[in-house]
Every structure is written in structure tokens, then in C-alpha cells.
């Protein structure tokens, strides 16, 4: 099957990026979210990405005009997927929300449509049954921002059709990603399996009062040559995701410290609108965080 029409389900930080990247690479893209406010926010993000691509990737005015011409937006789920060859889902990281959403999606999507999830925390088998097409369902996970961290981790479940898996690998490559195929289900894929211990160790140092977050980030950046430290990464990931990660860990393991950290993130960040880079402030203020200044390392 030739993939031409792509539907992005969820127009948040990553969903809006996936939509732009896919349209820029020549695919017709429909962006779906539950209300006009979310779609208006996605449109604004796309205007920003247009400027960024012109400034950093040599995109021409024609490239940008053509990209916008391939983007449409809707709050009608049936309308969004009526011609979809493939979908990319980025709805909230809560299992019951995922299951409920896929039941609704399965009832309106054509039989041909391949479903992919961008879930960071869960594996496809946890809600494959709800898709109504387990053979045509798998994960295609992106890192943030997707045009700089341009990997697409492709992970099936035991019931995923091998031919569908290969089609998604080829699609990821066609939209400018480097496909990262996984041979079995792994919560966290490759990138988050590597990243989680780092963020967890940083959290231990910070929440246990060993060092402040700037000192921890400074140590990591100087020692490894990384662009940012673990708390800068948390801002990039977003506080909502960090909260869900901590809550899931607390639920699965009964870890009281994880629950405490989740509550701290909610109280000190989410409740104050400090969602990370997406809102302009998390641990640091953006677009010019302290760790990008030479003075940070004095």
C-alpha cells in the first residue's frame, strides 16, 4: 500500500511537530484534536516551524507554501480519518484514555488504515485489542524536537503483521526520520530506556537535597559535552509527561518517593503553568535558558 494521506491524532507538542514534518516531506496531513483551541495552538506552532525551517533548514517560500497547502485541521474524528492510510496518535499517557480513544477510532477509520501510537510509556499490546485491527497496529515513537532528534522508534507487538511493520519503517524514512526498529516490546523503547536512569538519578540528587538542579545540569554538561543537563531535558519532555511517568511508577511499584515527586511536579510546576519549554518556563525560562549562557559555567 502506498501511503499518501496521514492523520495526526492529538495536536500537542509532538503531534504538531509530526504533522509539520510529514507535510513538509510531501504527504497530505489532517490534524485532529478535540477542540478548536487545540487546533488554533497547532496552527500557531506551524507558523513558528515555518520560520524555523526557513532560518535553519534552507526552506524556500515555495516549500513553506506547499507544506501549509498539505495541512488541514478538524475536530471531527470521522472526517479526520476518512481517507487515512496511516495515523499517528499522541493522546494523553493514560491507559484508559488510550483504550477509549482507540475504540472510537476503530469505529470510524477505514479498514486499510494503519494505526500507530506515539506513546512514550506504554507498549502496543496494552491496547492492541481496542484497535480492532491488531495486525495493523504498532508504535512509531518520536523524540523532541523531531527534526533534530530525528529518530522514529518502530515497535510492534506479537500480533503486528511483519509487512505492516516494514511499511511503517519505510514511511518513517520517507518523512526524514532514521528508523530504529525494535525486535520485541520494551517500555521506554531505546531512547527512554537509556534516558530514564539519568533523569531518575538527577531527581534523587535534587529531591534528596544533595545538589541544586543547576549544579546537577552543569556537572552533566561539562563532563559529557551534552547540549543540556537532565533538568533541561525534563523541560523538553514536559512536566505533564514527567508527572505521568512518576504516577505510573508509583502505581506499578508502590514507590512512595515517586508519588511524592509527582505531587511536587504538579504543585510546583503544572499548577503554576510551568509546563516546560512548551509554556516558556519549567526549571528554566525559555527561549534563552541559563544553561545556554557562558556565565552558567563560571
Image (tube, grey):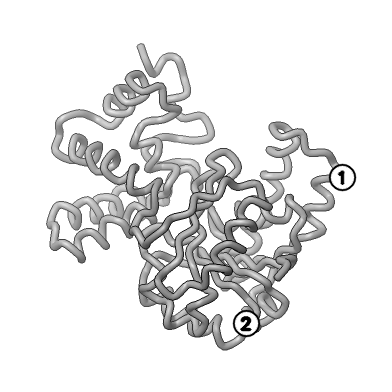
**Foreground pick, 194 / 107:** 194
Quarter that holds the C terminus: top left
Q: Which numbered disc, 2 or 1, marks the residue that appears first in the sequence?
A: 1
Figure check: 19 above or below 105: above
Residue at image location 33% in from the left, 43% down from the top: 194
| Residue marked by disc 2 | 109
Quadrant of residue 259 in the image? bottom left
Task: Answer with left or right where residue 4 lies relative to residue 129.
Answer: right
Residues at discs 2 and 1 in contact (Cβ within 8 Å)? no
Q: Is residue 150 above or below residue 76?
A: above
For discs 2 and 1, the disc positioned in front in the rendered view: 2
Task: Give the residue displayed 44% in from the left and 75% down from the top.
Answer: 159
Seen at 65% across and 68% down, the residue is 7
- Disc sitting over residue 294 in the figure: none
Q: Residue furthest right?
A: 62
Report which quarter residue 87 is drawn in: bottom right
Position of 226 with respect to 245 (left or right) is right
Amino acid at each position: 500500500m502506498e501511503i499518501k494521506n496521514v492523520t495526526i491524532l492529538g495536536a500537542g507538542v509532538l503531534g504538531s511537530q509530526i504533522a509539520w514534518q510529514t507535510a513538509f516531506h510531501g504527504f497530505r496531513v489532517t490534524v485532529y484534536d478535540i477542540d478548536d483551541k487545540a487546533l488554533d495552538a497547532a496552527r500557531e506552532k506551524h507558523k513558528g516551524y515555518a520560520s524555523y525551517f526557513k532560518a535553519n533548514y534552507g526552506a524556500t517560500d515555495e516549500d513553506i507554501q506547499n507544506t501549509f497547502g498539505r495541512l488541514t485541521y478538524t475536530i471531527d474524528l470521522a472526517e479526520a480519518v476518512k481517507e487515512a492510510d496511516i495515523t499517528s496518535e499522541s493522546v494523553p499517557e493514560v491507559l484508559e484514555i488510550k483504550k477509549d480513544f482507540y475504540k472510537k477510532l476503530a469505529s470510524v477509520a477505514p479498514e486499510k488504515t494503519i494505526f500507530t501510537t506515539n506513546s512514550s510509556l506504554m507498549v502496543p499490546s496494552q491496547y492492541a485489542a481496542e484497535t480492532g485491527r491488531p495486525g495493523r497496529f504498532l508504535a512509531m515513537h518520536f523524540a523532541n524536537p523531531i527534526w533534530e532528534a530525528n529518530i522514529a522508534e518502530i515497535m510492534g507487538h506479537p500480533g503486528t503483521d511483519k509487512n505492516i511493520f516494514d511499511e511503517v519503517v519505510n514511511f518513517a524514512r520517507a518523512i526524514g526520520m532514521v528508523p530504529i526498529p525494535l525486535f520485541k516490546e520494551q517500555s521506554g523503547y531505546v531512547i527512554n530506556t537509556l534516558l530514564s536512569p539519568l533523569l531518575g538519578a538527577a531527581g534523587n540528587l535534587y529531591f534528596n537535597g544533595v545538589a541544586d538542579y543547576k549544579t546537577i545540569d552543569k556537572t552533566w554538561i561539562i563532563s559529557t559535552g551534552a547540549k543540556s543537563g537532565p533538568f533541561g531535558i525534563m523541560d523538553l519532555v514536559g512536566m505533564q509527561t514527567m508527572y505521568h511517568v512518576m504516577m505510573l511508577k508509583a502505581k506499578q511499584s508502590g514507590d512512595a518517593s515517586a508519588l511524592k515527586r509527582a505531587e511536587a511536579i504538579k504543585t510546583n510546576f503544572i499548577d503554576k503553568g510551568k509546563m516546560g519549554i512548551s509554556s516558556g518556563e519549567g526549571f528554566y525560562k525559555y527561549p534563552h535558558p541559563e544553561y545556554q549562557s557562558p556565565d552558567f559555567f563560571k
